[in-house]
Image: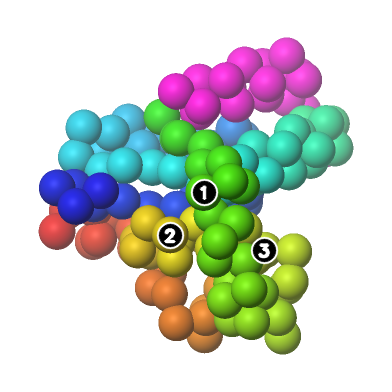
């Protein structure tokens, strides 16, 4: 990721890509100049929440899971075998906020890139964070 911008996506960004338009539009626009990745567990977390969100939002499960498949072509999952060596540091950084988010923090530490999230739990971890309404400032740099 040294020759291009990179971002680690939180599971909430994957879900926004499934059920919204803006996140996918941003990823498609910058797919050639930025590397999008996420901890492998974020795809599992997205799969877990898709049924309830689809039901509430009027989307079909088939269309939501098809969209997640499309996203998997743009977002590279990072395996625990790679980010696991940063577990202790990641857990320490996020312990007071949401300890379950340590894989995202660990992946950002591994790759030395910011986190794209709407979750304020990542603020104060010492890792830059970008929200959807501001992420293009980073991606254009």
Q: CA distance from mark 2 to mark 3?
A: 15 Å
The disc, 2 or 3, on the residue closer to the chain's N-terminal end is 3
Q: Main secondary structure of the magenta part?
A: helix
Q: Which residues are magenta?
A: 56-73
Q: Nearer the viewer, residue 25 or 40?
A: 40
- Figure quadrant of the C terminus: bottom left
Is 30 displayed left or right of 84 in the figure?
left
**Residue 55: quadrant of the picture:** top right
Dot 1: few (<14), some (14–19), or many (≥20) neighbours within 10 Å? few
Query: For mark 1, what is the residue?
Result: 82
Assess whether residue 80 is covered by the magenta stretch. no
The spot of residue 8 in percent (x, y) is: 45, 53
Q: CA distance from mark 3 to mark 1?
A: 16 Å
Query: For mark 2, what is the residue?
Result: 110
Residue 101 — which label? Answer: 3
Question: In terms of secondary structure, where does tag 1 sit?
Answer: helix
- Which of discs 2 and 3 lies nearer the camera? The answer is 2
């Amino acid at each position: 990721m040294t020759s291009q911008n990179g971002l680690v996506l939180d599971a909430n960004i994957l879900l926004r890509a499934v059920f919204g338009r803006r996140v996918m539009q941003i990823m498609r626009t910058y797919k050639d100049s930025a590397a999008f990745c996420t901890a492998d567990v974020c795809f599992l977390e997205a799969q877990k929440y898709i049924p309830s969100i689809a039901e509430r939002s009027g989307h079909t499960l088939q269309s939501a899971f098809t969209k997640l498949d499309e996203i998997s072509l743009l977002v590279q999952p990072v395996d625990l075998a790679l980010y696991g060596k940063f577990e202790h540091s990641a857990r320490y950084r996020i312990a007071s906020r949401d300890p379950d988010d340590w894989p995202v923090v660990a992946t950002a530490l591994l790759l030395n890139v910011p986190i794209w999230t709407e979750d304020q739990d990542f603020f104060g971890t010492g890792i830059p964070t970008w929200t959807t309404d501001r992420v293009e400032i980073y991606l254009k740099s």
